[in-house]
Image (cartoon, rainbow, N blue to C red):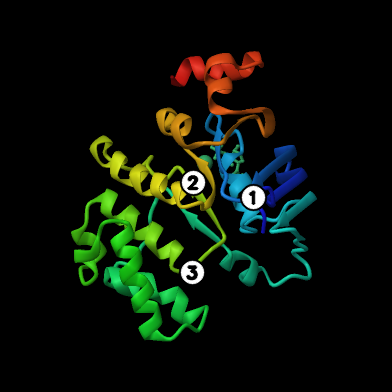
């Protein structure tokens, strides 16, 4: 794959819940190793867009291409598709009865049929990467929220995804724990992971994003480089939103 390859392409996506039209003709393009940050008010459709990209929700119209393949939810094995797309949520949802290492190796062993030794080897490497090498054998309840979220990131990475989706990964954390999670995400970005991130951490977005996408009421209002969006937004609605959050 060359640098310019498009890893995620969303074309004219529409999604409704009953009579509520949540995503309206959404286009999105993410190239290999790019970081795209989605911003917008609560209810603007950010989570739904991520969930459509991961096929946790199925769009009614429009097309989604992942790594160049048009995904057809009726024909394609969505479990296989999802394996290539790691997702990290606001609530980490670690299995409470499993140790950190058990949480990390569960899906690789059960879903990918990876050998246990190999899963543990990868798990150790990932715990090192998220700065938790000494926590392999503890249970999630013994960890801080920031540590639990770092385990959740390691768990998603254990499936060796091509794409990582983050839905407000730091919104549930005490302010002093936000930085350690953002640092892990920054390191991932520097390694070249392709990422789509919903966040309200505008400083982080500015530093890490290649593009910022502003959504309002289910529509993409503006896409641009962070400096352009934050300093010189073209659209009134973008300016108004940013004036409230910056
Ligand atoms: P955001 O993540 O930007 O806050 P969401 O994508 O979660 O927005 O939600 C967009 C809109 O869709 C909201 O009005 C929300 O209430 C609605 N919505 C989201 N998920 C569902 C669902 N499963 N059923 C019905 N309505 C939903
Ligand atoms: Mg959301």
Residue shown at the point (47%, 37%) measured from the top left: 208
Q: In which quadrant of this rendering is ligand 1 seen? A: top right
Which label is found at residue 220? none
What residue does disc 2 label?
A: 167
Observer-nearest of 114 and 73? 114
Question: Toward the viewer: 149 or 193?
Answer: 193
Residue pictured at 19% horizontal, 65% vertical: 134
Among numbered discs 3 and 1, the one appearing first in the sequence: 1
- Compared with 172, 42 (above or below) is above
The answer to whether residue 20 of the structure is visible from this angle is: no
Which of the 4 image quadrants contains residue 97? Answer: bottom left
Residue 233 position in % (x across, y down): 61, 17
Q: Earlier in the sequence, mark 2 or mark 3?
A: 3
Residue 138 quadrant: bottom left
Mark 2 vs mark 3, foreground winner is 3
Q: Label 1, label 2: how many angstroms apart (C-alpha)?
A: 25 Å
Q: Quadrant of residue 30?
A: top right
Give the residue at mark 1.
3
Classify 10 Å Cα crowding around label 1: few (below 14), some (14-19), many (20 and above).
few
Query: Between 121 and 87, which is closer to the camera in this rendering?
Result: 121
- At mark 2, the secondary structure is strand
* Above-or-below relation of 166 to 103: above
Distance from disc 2 to disc 3, alpha carbons, whole Å, reads: 18 Å
The residue beneath circle 3 is 159
Q: Earlier in the sequence, mark 1 or mark 2?
A: 1
The reply to whether the residue tagged 2 has its Cβ within 8 angstroms of ligand 2 is yes
């Amino acid at each position: 794959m060359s640098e310019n390859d498009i890893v995620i392409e969303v074309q004219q996506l529409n999604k409704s819940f009953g009579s509520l039209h949540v995503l309206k003709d959404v286009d999105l393009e993410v190239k290999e190793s790019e970081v795209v940050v989605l911003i917008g008010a609560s209810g603007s459709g950010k989570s739904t867009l991520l969930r459509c990209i991961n096929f946790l929700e199925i769009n009614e119209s429009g097309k989604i291409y992942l790594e160049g393949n048009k995904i057809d939810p009726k024909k394609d094995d969505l479990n296989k598709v999802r394996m290539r797309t790691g997702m990290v949520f606001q609530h980490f949802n670690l299995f409470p009865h499993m140790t950190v290492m058990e949480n990390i190796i569960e899906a690789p062993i059960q879903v990918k049929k990876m050998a246990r030794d190999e899963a543990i080897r990868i798990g150790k490497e990932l715990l090192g990467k998220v700065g938790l090498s000494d926590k392999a054998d503890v249970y999630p309840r013994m960890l801080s929220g920031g540590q639990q979220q770092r385990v959740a990131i390691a768990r998603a990475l254990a499936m060796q995804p091509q794409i990582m989706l983050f839905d407000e990964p730091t919104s549930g954390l005490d302010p002093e724990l936000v930085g350690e999670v953002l640092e892990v995400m920054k390191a991932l970005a520097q390694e070249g992971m392709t990422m789509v991130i919903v966040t309200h951490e505008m400083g982080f977005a500015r530093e890490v994003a290649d593009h910022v996408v502003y959504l309002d009421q289910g529509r993409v209002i503006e896409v641009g480089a962070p400096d352009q969006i934050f300093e010189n937004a073209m659209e009134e609605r973008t300016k108004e939103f940013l004036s409230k959050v910056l």
